[in-house]
Amino acid sequence: VILLNPDGSESGIQGTTDTEGYYQLQYVPFGDRILVVKSSGSVVIQYDISLSTLDYQLDIAIPEPMAYTDTRDGKSYSASKIGDQIWFVDNLAYLPEVCPPDWESDSLELYYVYSYQGTDLNQAKESNNYKTYGVLYNWAAAKSSCPEGWHLPGDEEWKTLEMYLGMEPEDADTVKWRLTGAVGMKLKNDSGWDSDGNGNNNSGFSALPGGFRGLDGEFGGIGL
């Protein structure tokens, strides 16, 4: 539990809940503050609070899946604890601008919506593909698009997830086909995949087949 100043900056005041889930913050100044709750290093809930008494009680219930709201655009996401990790179980849909698929850059941040060919942001956000699958990011955009308190998972984090779901460690360290534990079935959503490709989603990860933008500027792979 972390207390932020009214402008969102770190106050240095924070605490960790005890085994019963209770916490106490010391030497908190009165006034408007922002209370942030993190689990496994990821922001799961954020509250605006106004402190006017020494004893401020706040009951915080973190449901499963947890709700997280991106303060940049107000869009809400679901997140779930899988093992000791917290994962988004919705595709990221942060879209500050939209680019047609023939735009390409290794350094500029570019954002695409599957099958959308224009630059009208509102029009792109009204498309079914945006609502279902979110945004396709080039690497420059992907590195900067996660909400504050979240990050892109690295290889070790993916392997932790895979092994928790039943993959053998030697399989997790290899590339290409890795079949132990039927992890793909557990990660894939139980609907939305073509060609009898649905999973059982036992993990709650809810992976959807959002496709890709190819190097030729063409979209492909949606549903697969």
Image (cartoon, helix red, strand yellow):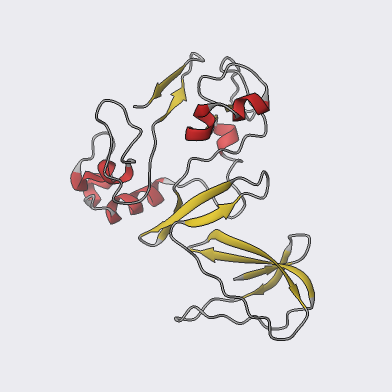
Horizontally, residue 151 falls left or right of residue 72, namely left
Note whether 201 is above or below 127 in the view shown: below
Horizontally, residue 53 falls left or right of residue 212, namely right
Query: Which is nearer the eye, 45 or 190?
Result: 190
Point out residue 134 in the picture as x, y percentages from the top left corner. Answer: 52, 34
Image quarter for residue 178? top left
Note whether 42 is above or below 174 in the view shown: below
Horizontally, residue 170 falls left or right of residue 127, namely left
Note whether 57 is above or below 171 in the view shown: below
Horizontally, residue 203 falls left or right of residue 53, namely left
Q: Which residue is drawn at the image coordinates 73% and 86% (left, top)?
A: 54
Q: Quadrant of the C terminus?
A: top left
Q: Quadrant of the N terminus?
A: bottom right
Point out residue 128 in the picture as x, y percentages from the top left corner. Answer: 51, 28
Image quarter for residue 110? top right
Query: Which is nearer the eye, 135 or 132?
Result: 132
Point out residue 172 in the picture as x, y percentages from the top left corner. Answer: 27, 46
* Outermost bottom residue: 54
Give the mark count: 0
Query: Which is nearer the eye, 133 or 161?
Result: 133
Note whether 217 is above or below 199 in the view shown: above
Point out residue 139 in the picture as x, y percentages from the top left corner. Answer: 54, 32
Q: Which residue is drawn at the image coordinates 28% and 46% (left, top)?
A: 186
